[in-house]
Each structure stands twice: as C-alpha cells, then as structure tokens.
Image (cartoon, rainbow, N blue to C red):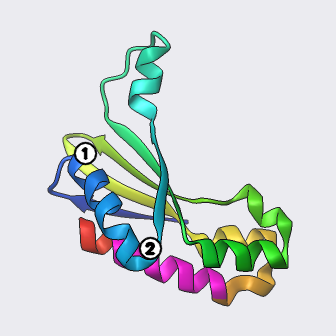
Amino acid sequence: MHYIEQSNKSVDEVVNAIKEKAPSYKFGVLHVHEIDNTLKSKGLEFTKECKVLDVCNPGFAKKLLDEDMSFSVILPCKIAVYSQDGDTIIGMNSIVQLIDDVNPDMIETAQEIQDILLKLISDVK
C-alpha cells in the first residue's frame, strides 16, 4: 500500500517545503535523489520530474535498529515527489506495512512514524 497526495505546487516547491518543514516534525532530509537528472545524465530521454527524499528521525531509527538490525533495509524512509500528467504528486509507501514485513512487534512505532510523515505531507502539499 502507498499513500498519494496531489499538490498545486511544483515538484521543486514541494521538495523545498519538505526540507524546510521536516525539522519541525523532528525529521531531517538526508538526501534528495534527483531521479530525473540521474536518468538524463546517463543519456536517457526522460521528461518527467522525479525526486525521492530520504527522511529520517534519529530516535526512531535507533529504536528500530536496536530492536532488529534488519530494519536497515527499509531505512531511511522515502517520500517521492514527481510530475504526472501535469500534476505534482507526493507519494510514500506504507511504513506500517514495510515494518510489519520485517518485524511485526514494532507496528506501534511504525504507526507513529507513518502518522508523523503523513502530517508532514499534508502540511506541504
């Protein structure tokens, strides 16, 4: 399952808003993968915009990794911002589902993380 929100803002405006507002949700943006520019730099024709943000809350990351190091395969959390048919889309996989697949004992933590990130997305859209 994944969550999709539409925005009236441009891709870059949403990305910048996430970078600006994430700290108020106690998350940081570790990196922005510019998928569109990467594909173009490899000589591929690609006309859509696509950015993927790695976001992390160190406290949650430590809590998950202290419980089970295999959580490292799904960290950091990702938020995608892309253009599709003239619209700007913000997407995120279900953190609850991802964590449940690794270790269902951490569902409550997963729900807390997911709720915070969905509030962030709602705030910036």
Stretch of the chain drawn in magenta: 109-120
Taking the image as shown, residue 44 lies to the left or right of residue 121, namely: right
Q: Is residue 111 magenta?
A: yes
For this orientation, the residue located farthest to the bottom is 108
Please state the horizontal and vertical placement of residue 29, each as a whole percent of the image: 45, 58
Taking the image as shown, residue 27 lies to the left or right of residue 85, namely: right
Q: Amino acid type of disc 2?
A: Leu
Please state the horizontal and vertical placement of residue 38, each as a whole percent of the image: 46, 25
Q: Nearer the viewer, residue 125 or 62?
A: 62
Q: Residue, x 65% and y 85% (percent of image)?
A: 109
Q: Amino acid type of disc 1?
A: Asp
Q: Residue, x 29% and y 42% (percent of image)?
A: 84
Circle 2 sits on which residue?
A: 117
For this orientation, the residue located farthest to the top is 43
Splitting the image into 4 quarters, where does residue 103 fall? bottom right
Circle 1 sits on which residue?
A: 12
Taking the image as shown, residue 65 lies to the left or right of residue 110, namely: right
Q: Nearer the viewer, residue 121 or 6?
A: 121
**Disc 1 versus disc 2: distance between alpha carbons?**
18 Å
